[in-house]
Image (spheres, rainbow, N blue to C red):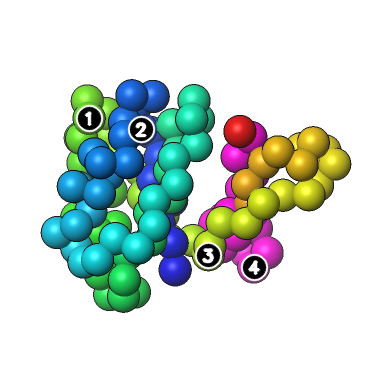
Amino acid sequence: MTLLVGNLPCEVTEANLKELFTKFGTVEKIDIFPGSGFATVTIEGEANEERAVQELNGVEKFGQKLQLFKSAPVKPSDNPRQGGGGRVIEGLGDGPGDVIVIEI
């Protein structure tokens, strides 16, 4: 599983996020979507991810209140509506198959 981290300031770095999430376990991957206020963080172990969501969701970091969601891995979008330049994050929303597309 992957965490979607929202409401990030534009100046947040991979090092900032790694430092924040390392206390929950081994950070396997971080993807920052420039200018979107979103990043994805993959932490080893679903229990660690769950704990990160519980402890950080709504907490002020980097001058803004973080929004955290559990999601499936991010994959490139080949949807022509997005010009093929988006990233699709599955597993968010009210039902199966709901997706969020982040334009980059």
Amino acid marked by disc 1: Phe
The residue pinned by badge 1 equals 62
Kind of residue indicated by mark 2: Leu
Q: In terms of depth relative to the viewer, which is nearer, 23 or 5?
A: 23
Residue 48, quarter of picture: bottom left
Give the crowd class for mark 2: few <14, some 14-19, many >=20 residues within 10 Å.
many
- Residue 7 picture quarter: top left
Q: Secondary structure at mark 3?
A: loop
Can residue 56 be seen from the camera position used here? no
**Above or below for 57 versus 50:** above
- The answer to whether the residue labelled 3 contacts the one labelled 4, judged by CB atoms less than 8 Å apart, is no
At 81% from the left and 47% from the top, the residue drawn is: 79
Q: Dot 1 lies on which element?
A: loop
Please report contact status of discs 1 and 4: CB closer than 8 Å, yes or no.
Answer: no
- Residue at mark 4: 96
Q: Nearer the viewer, mark 2 or mark 4?
A: 2
The residue wearing badge 2 is 8
Instruction: Decide which of 21, 57 is in the foreground and name it.
Output: 21
Alpha carbon separation for disc pair 2 and 1: 7 Å
N-terminal of the two: label 2 or label 1?
2
Report x, y in % for residue 100: 61, 48
Q: Badge 3 is on which residue?
A: 72
Range covered by the magenta-colored residues: 89-103
Q: Is residue 16 visible?
A: yes
**74 to the left or right of 64:** right
Query: Which of the two discs, 1 and 3, labels the residue nearer the N terminus?
Result: 1
Residue 26 vs residue 96, the one in the foreground: 26
* Contact, mark 2 vs mark 1 (Cβ under 8 Å): yes
Q: Residue at x 25, y 49 (%)?
A: 18
Instruction: Tell me if 18 is positioned left or right of 72 in this view.
Output: left
Q: Amino acid at mark 3?
A: Ala
Q: Secondary structure at mark 2?
A: loop
